[in-house]
Amino acid sequence: MAAPTLVLATRNPHKLREFARLLKPAGIGVERLPEGVELPPENGHTFAANAVPKARAAAAAVGGAAIGDDSGIEAQALNGRPGVRSARYAGERASDGENLQQLIRDAPAGSELRYVCALAYVDPVTGEERVFEGECCGRMAAAPRGSRGFGYDPVFELQDGRTMAELSDAEKDTISHRGRAARALSAWLSGR
């Protein structure tokens, strides 16, 4: 079976670049969501509950296979917050920088963090729907460091003492929550 090209249900250019890079080694292409396609609101209580409707909406709009992700950060000291509200942690229209500053105010340095990704695959032709999950554990850095990555990466400190924002793309892809979910999807697609 030939490797597919999938539409990614997002308007986030960072996620589009990252998933294109993550799926390229498996020969899977990733296309931008067409303009005018409306995505459902992220009002689910789990990452998967937000990812699946986005993938369904994109798949229905293009008449072919699509993927949708919902991902975020969970702080143990905050009982798992911001979780599914990671993109809106500092408010409905908050920027990445505002969300990051809110987490810095709320989560103590050294406390445990977990990145989570739910990656949904929907094919309206075959009726197949699958969710692939990935996670990465770390801790809250004492201060933001690094200029790579996006979102909460500058404060997500790994066991080796570097933050996600200090890693090369290749290093991040190996350990990240999205990298793990994307490899699970790739493995499943190649084994069909």
Image (cartoon, helix red, strand yellow):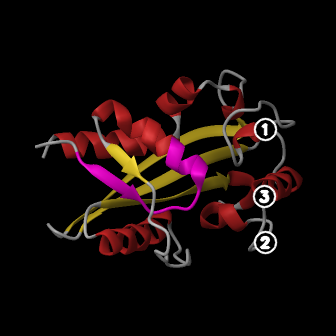
The disc, 1 or 2, on the residue closer to the chain's N-terminal end is 2
Q: Which mark is residue 36?
A: none
The answer to whether 104 is drawn above or below residue 18 in the figure is below
> Can you tell which quarter of the image residue 86 is in?
bottom right
Residue contact between numbered discs 1 and 2, judged by CB atoms under 8 Å:
no
Foreground pick, 107 / 131? 131
Measured as percent of width and height from the top left, residue 62 is found at 31, 69
- Vertical side of 74 occupied by 36: above or below: below
Query: Three-letter amino acid code at disc 2?
Result: Gly
Residue 187 falls left or right of residue 88: left
- Per the image, the residue denoted by label 3 is 99
Magenta span: 4-17
SS label for mark 2: loop
Residues at marks 2 and 3 touching, judged by CB atoms closer than 8 Å: no
Sequence-first tag of 2 and 3:
2
| Residue matched to label 2 | 91
